[in-house]
Amino acid sequence: MPRRIHAHRGLAQPSRLQVVALVMEQPGLSLADLCAQTGLHANTLRDHVRVLTEEGLIRSEVEHRATRGRPRALFYPVDAMRTASA
């Protein structure tokens, strides 16, 4: 199924492109990791990540851990082959 025309709006901003590149290079980054590597504020990154997730460019998974506290969301690139066959 071809992508919608507006599907690449997530890459229209240089900072979103930077986030996608980082997630592709280092799958499993958290929001704090992205903040440290991009220098962007967490609230700004939350919006970027939301748009990139909605556009199908990255995905998030909840970290599984045995310690107390809220688990982190970890970000991974979307596998185009897996998505196309689903």
Image: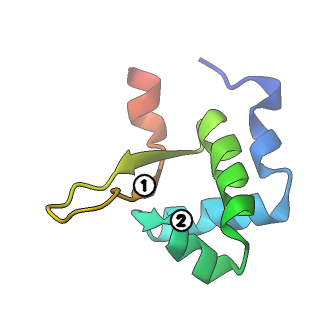
Give the image quarter of residue 52.
top right
Secondary structure, mark 1, is strand
Between the C-alphas of marks 2 and 1, the distance is 7 Å
Q: Residue at x 35, y 56 (%)?
A: 70
Q: Tell me which amino acid carries mark 2.
A: Leu
Q: Position of residue 59 (x, y in %)?
A: 48, 44
Give the image quarter of residue 9.
top right
Q: Position of residue 82 (x, y in %)?
A: 38, 33
Q: Would you name the residue on which mark 2 appears?
A: 31
Q: Residue at x 74, y 32 (%)?
A: 7
On screen, residue 4 versus residue 66, left or right, reads right
Q: Residue at x 30, y 61 (%)?
A: 69
Q: Is residue 17 above or below residue 78?
A: below
Q: Nearer the viewer, residue 2 or 61?
A: 61
Give the image quarter of residue 14.
bottom right
Q: Is residue 34 above or below residue 9?
A: below
